[in-house]
Amino acid sequence: MFCIMGLGNPEKRYEGTRHNLGFDVVECLAERLRIPFKDGKGEYLIALGDSAGTPVALIKPMTYMNESGVAAADVCEQLTVPLEQLLVVCDDFQLPLGHLRLRLRGSDGGHNGLYSVIYHLQSDGFPRLRCGIASPSMPKEKDRMAEFVLERFETAELLIVRQMVENAAEASLVAIRRGLTTAMNEFNKRVTPEEDSPTP
């Protein structure tokens, strides 16, 4: 069983915000794999399916961001998911908009959701896929970052965001089918619509 957990906040008012990129990615995966989300045996939604013969569980915690680890611990115990096969997807204001960074383990990097997952699993030994949200509109004052991540993307950013979500979903599938190291080598770079265009 390979589990992909997207971090975010429930409630409609948080849809489309920077902090909900994890939700956006697992929802994109659910569409690709054609599997619906349903209530899990805990505070999370789950979509069960298959990718190239590997059982897959997509997870959306309903605990709100700062308690994401509660759902992570429940899922790992109930589905017997080894930590190395729990891929956590989240936003990252330390990465430029459009960048992806897949790592096999590491610190929370100042992300409250990752902090909660590490705390409740009592380990940082799980892979994580960070989706960059840093942009010129990001405030320089650290005390305004909580407000920034809960805002929706600007119209001019949406094309890059959509491409990043698609890339993150594809990176997740590559991790399942061909391994995390291969996915790291292929996706730990910026890929924007502009960069995909032919050079004039």
Image (cartoon, rainbow, N blue to C red):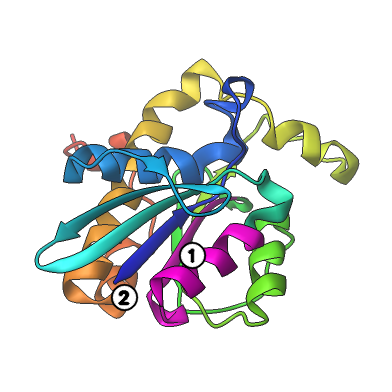
Q: Give whichever of 165, 196 is nearer the camera.
A: 165
Q: In the image, 159: left or right of 53?
A: right
User: Magenta residues?
Assistant: 69-91
Q: Which residue is mark 2?
A: 180
Q: Residue 63's spot in the image, x, y percent?
A: 65, 46
Predominant SS along the magenta part:
helix
Q: In the image, 42: left or right of 119?
A: left
Q: Secondary structure at mark 1?
A: helix
Relative to 175, residue 8 above or below: above
Q: Secondary structure at mark 2?
A: helix
Quarter holding the N terminus is: bottom left
The local crowd at label 2, few if under 14, some if 14 to 19, many if 20 or more residues have their Cα within 10 Å, is many
Q: Give whichever of 84, 98 is nearer the camera.
A: 84
Using the image, tell me which numbered label, if any, was put on residue 75: 1
Under mark 2, the amino acid is Leu
Under mark 1, the amino acid is Val
Q: Residue 56's spot in the image, x, y percent?
A: 26, 61
Q: Residue 187's spot in the image, x, y percent?
A: 32, 61
Q: Residue at x 70, y 63 (%)?
A: 116
What is the count of numbered marks?
2
Q: In the image, 186: left or right of 126?
A: left
Relative to 93, residue 36 above or below: above
Does residue 54 appear in the picture of this structure? yes
Nearer the observer: mark 1 or 2; the answer is 1
Using the image, tell me which numbered label, if any, was put on residue 117: none
Q: Is residue 122 magenta?
A: no
Q: Residue at x 27, y 53 (%)?
A: 48
Q: Residue at x 58, y 58 (%)?
A: 71
